[in-house]
Image: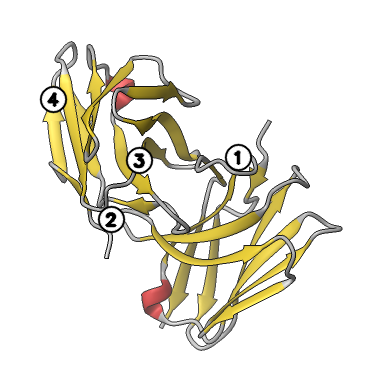
Amino acid sequence: DQQVKQNSPSLSVQEGRISILNCDYTNSMFDYFLWYKKYPAEGPTFLISISSIKDKNEDGRFTVFLNKSAKHLSLHIVPSQPGDSAVYFCAAPLSSGTYKYIFGTGTRLKVLA
Amino acid sequence: DVKVTQSSRYLVKRTGEKVFLECVQDMDHENMFWYRQDPGLGLRLIYFSYDVKMKEKGDIPEGYSVSREKKERFSLILESASTNQTSMYLCASIGGNQPQHFGDGTRLSIL
């Protein structure tokens, strides 16, 4: 049972436009969620997180929205830049107080110049 | 700034070989992890360790073992490498209120 799902394996967006990456989850007990970005041949780097008590968190061009009733979160990148081309993973701690994460399968974003 | 260092970026081994992947972190973190990343499957947890000499199986431990003799070092061992273990291997550590911090990964090819 996949508790964190990213149903879109890939997404292409024109430079300057908005990129929206989606993530669905099944466990309503998750305390917070994270997004990681991964370039080829590099490890994932932490991008942004959101607590389950919030519905929005913003950091520069990156905003994460959380819809608890729909068990859905999304990452918005505005404006998209070619350097944003990477694989994006959403993740959540497996249970409260644990350091173990469960990751989605990732969405490959390609920003076209 | 947290630094997680994986000893090799690229590694090529033959089937049946015993393979060691090394990971070192410099932040005195108690918790360390080994993942593998495969296309369409995301990051899957192989093993994790929450203290020296302590370990727990993750989701896909078969064919792997680990060693944590010192706090800063977490080793992943492929007992007898097989071609289906060709993958990108990622080590991570975590401590305090920080998110998991990853190394740059080891791209392992088993021929």
Residue under pointer 3 = B30
Residue A94 bears which disc, if any?
A: 1
Q: Are marks 1 and 2 on the same chain?
A: yes
Q: Disc 3 to disc 4, how far (Cα)? A: 30 Å
> Could you say which quadrant of the image residue A58 lies in?
bottom right
Residue under pointer 4 = B13
Q: Chain of mark 3?
A: B
The image shows residue B104 at horizontal and vertical percentages of 25, 52
Q: Are discs 2 and 4 less than 8 Å apart at CB?
A: no
Q: Closer to the observer: label 2 or label 4? A: 2
Q: Residues within 10 Å of mark 2 (few under 14, many from 20)?
A: some
Q: Closer to the observer: label 1 or label 2? A: 1
Q: Disc 3 to disc 1, how far (Cα)? A: 18 Å
Left or right: A100 in relation to B37? right
Indicate the amino acid at tag 3.
Answer: Glu
Coloring applied to the structure: secondary structure
Indicate the amino acid at tag 1.
Answer: Leu
Q: Disc 2 to disc 4, how far (Cα)? A: 21 Å
Q: Are discs 3 and 4 less than 8 Å apart at CB?
A: no
Indicate the amino acid at tag 4.
Answer: Lys
Q: Residues within 10 Å of mark 1 (few under 14, many from 20)?
A: some
The residue lying toward the viewer, choosing from B31 and A85, is B31
Report helix, strand or loop for mark 2.
Answer: loop
Residue A42 bears which disc, if any?
A: 2
Q: Are marks 3 and 2 on the same chain?
A: no
